[in-house]
């Protein structure tokens, strides 16, 4: 791992944590669709932190998710549940962002935030195990 890879990884973890806090603020202010969006992005940035260590990046979200699932979930580095949570977050974010007249509920947001938190914590545990963060 190069210093550049580690720095990018740490930046993305910080970005994930900030975005998770943003989701919480949106939820508290009843901005449920925004909270769903921010929850997904918190998990997405955490996944991109892992990819930074492999010096791998993609422009499209689906490519990031597919690579993570293939190289990290299917390989057994992360449990399959993490892949399922990420897929659920992505689908809900797309529905919330793009479907007309979609009304998000507090319960949906709570589920999204819990899923994003689980992904972020799993990734931080992986990074601790690999001596990237303390």
Image (cartoon, rainbow, N blue to C red):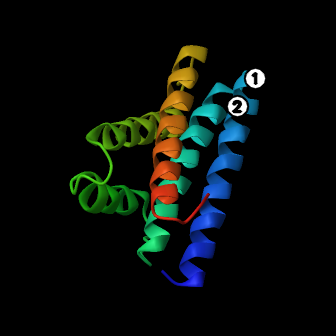
Q: Residue 105 location, x and y as percent? A: 57, 16
Residue holding disc 1: 28
Q: Nearer the viewer, residue 95 or 38?
A: 38
Q: Are marks 1 and 2 in contact (CB under 8 Å)?
A: yes
Q: Which residue is mark 2?
A: 24
Q: Residue at x 55, y 36 (%)?
A: 117
Q: Is residue 12 visible?
A: yes
Rendered image quadrant of residue 87:
top left
Which type of secondary structure does the marked residue at label 2 adopt? helix
| Residue for point 52% across, 42% down | 121
Q: Position of residue 84 (x, y in %)?
A: 32, 38
Q: Residue 82: horizontal and vertical position, in percent?
A: 36, 41
| Visible residue check, residue 44 | no
Q: Secondary structure at mark 1?
A: helix
> Would you say 75 lies left or right of 36 here?
left
Question: For the C terminus, which image quadrant?
Answer: bottom right
Q: Residues within 10 Å of mark 2 (few under 14, many from 20)?
A: many
Residue 3 lies in what quarter of the image? bottom right
Q: Is residue 126 above or below residue 113?
A: below
- Residue 39's image quarter? top right
């Amino acid at each position: 791992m190069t210093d550049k890879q580690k720095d990018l990884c740490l930046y993305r973890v910080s970005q994930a944590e900030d975005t998770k806090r943003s989701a919480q603020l949106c939820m508290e202010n009843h901005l449920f669709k925004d909270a769903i969006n921010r929850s997904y992005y918190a998990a997405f940035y955490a996944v991109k932190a892992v990819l930074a260590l492999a010096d791998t990046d993609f422009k499209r979200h689906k490519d990031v998710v597919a690579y993570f699932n293939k190289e990290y979930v299917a390989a057994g580095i992360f449990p399959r549940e993490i892949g399922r949570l990420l897929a659920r977050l992505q689908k809900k974010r797309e529905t919330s962002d793009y479907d007309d007249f979609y009304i998000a509920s507090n319960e949906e947001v709570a589920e999204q935030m819990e899923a994003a938190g689980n992904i972020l914590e799993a990734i931080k545990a992986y990074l601790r195990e690999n001596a990237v963060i303390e």
